[in-house]
Image: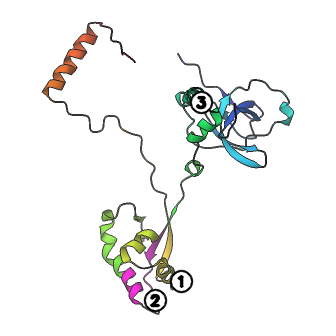
Amino acid sequence: MSEPLKTYGEGDIVAVMLGVAVEGPYSYRVGVGIKVARGSIVMVPLGPRQTMGVVWGEPKDKVAHNRLKDILLNFDVPRLSEELLQLVNWVARYTLARPGMVLRAVLRSREALDPARSIIGYQVSGHEPERMTPARARVLEVMEQQSDGAADFPGGLASGLASGFAWTKTALVGESGVSPSVIEGLVKAGTLRRVELPPPQLVGVPDPDFAPPVLNKNQQQAVKKLETAFEGGNQWHCLTG
């Protein structure tokens, strides 16, 4: 039975492995209103800058704890698994690399930890521009003709607003063949209005039962033999070389 996860609260001293060229974790004090556990991804001060790190657990010692710096932020994301933390240590030993540099490969993108950003879309307001150019007319024609076919433009368009269909600028420029300045000109003229769209959905949890393999007759017979052998209590060993 696995031990319950130990959490650390305000004022506790923890070891934090940083994604820099260090031999081991540094000690930090948990900041005000922050709770962490082993595997929590945090932001901490390191000299004049801030850097990401991972809570490694209890520090080896608590010397000069009154001079420690505080953890600034605990990212609202799932903790790194115990298996991944052990893999970082194993890779560091196997490749004779510093654990911090191995961890850096895990924490490559700060932006991936930030909350999803909303998307700016564009809708037709119903107001005709005072000056109609061929480029502007092409934009309005595309928006009018293609609004009903939103599903044909995956990733480029966004919908779901009660007031009508909305296009992203990238999709609208690509479909109409005009420059972004034409879109901005229509916004200034009041013909298009900007709307805030919800961020795109994150990738769902993989389904291990999705599209199961289809076995032929010989493969099915082999599976039956293996199942029968295991039911009889036979021991199987994997040979490594």
Looking at the rendered image, the quarter that the C terminus falls into is: top left
Query: Can you name the residue that lies furthest to the top here?
Result: 233
Report the mark closest to the observer, 3 or 2.
Answer: 3
- Front one among 20 and 124: 20
The residue labelled by disc 2 is 129
Q: CA distance from mark 3 to mark 2?
A: 63 Å
On the image, the x and y values in percent for residue 87 come to 54, 29
Of label 2 and label 1, which has the lower sequence position? 2
Q: Which residue is mark 3?
A: 92
Report whether 110 appears left or right of 142: right
Region rendered in magenta: 121-140
Answer with the quarter of the image where residue 20 lies. Answer: top right
Give the left or right position of residue 139, taking residue 25 as reference: left
- Horizontal arrangement in the rendering, residue 239 relative to residue 40 (left or right): left
Q: Is residue 61 left or right of residue 142?
A: right
Query: To which residue does mark 1 refer?
Result: 188
Identified at 22% across, 21% down, the residue is: 223
